[in-house]
Amino acid sequence: MLCLDATYRLAGSGGATRTVTARDFYLGTYATALKPGEIVTEIEIPMPQVGHGYAYEKLKRKIGDYATAAAGVMLTLSRGKIASCAIALSNLSDRALLAEDAATLVIGSALEKPALDAAVKAARAIMSPASDTRGSAEYRTYVGGVMVERALKKAFARAKT
């Protein structure tokens, strides 16, 4: 939802409604911007632009397991170069992250290796996963970068077709 620039419409028990962006909705592990008595009543996702590509890559041990690391990408191409990009990370911090610096590093590129490597490095720089039964923090940060790279490549390929 972070990559898609989604917004959530929330309704309270008194009938009051408010809108919260996805980037402001997720506050931490099992914590959201919902106030007591509120529920999500609507999710709005803008229509993707022409030339868009998307991907979601995750590493997990088995079906139904929580991901060790995951990355989602939404990008658009213009004349073979990335015109816009959003990279979201999950299970790599106490909340979902939007890797804005990493996304900025690929804009204007045709996803050449230097831009791709720089984006992966920037994404890893904001990761702060906990060590757990799925792996150490170092391992999860490493595979988080791998998921970012795979998602960027897949989204780029999808945008070209």
Image (tube, rainbow, N blue to C red):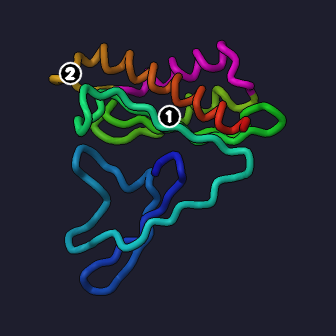
User: Residue 75 occupies which quadrant of the picture?
Assistant: top right
| Image coords of residue 83 (percent x, y) | 73, 39
Segment tinted magenta in the rendering: 109-127
Question: Residue at 41% of width from left, 73% of height from top?
Answer: 18
Could you tell me the amino acid type at mark 1?
Answer: Ala
| Image coords of residue 148 (percent x, y) | 49, 26
Could you tell me the amino acid type at mark 2?
Answer: Ser
Contact (CB < 8 A) between labels 1 and 2? no
Mark 2 lies on a secondary structure that is loop
Question: Residue at 20% of width from left, 21% of height from top?
Answer: 131
Secondary structure character of the magenta stretch overall: helix
Q: CA distance from mark 1 to mark 2?
A: 21 Å
Q: Does 123 lie within the magenta span?
A: yes
The residue tagged 2 is 131
Mark 1 lies on a secondary structure that is loop
Q: Residues within 10 Å of mark 1 (few under 14, many from 20)?
A: many
| Observer-nearest of 158 and 102 | 158
The residue tagged 1 is 99
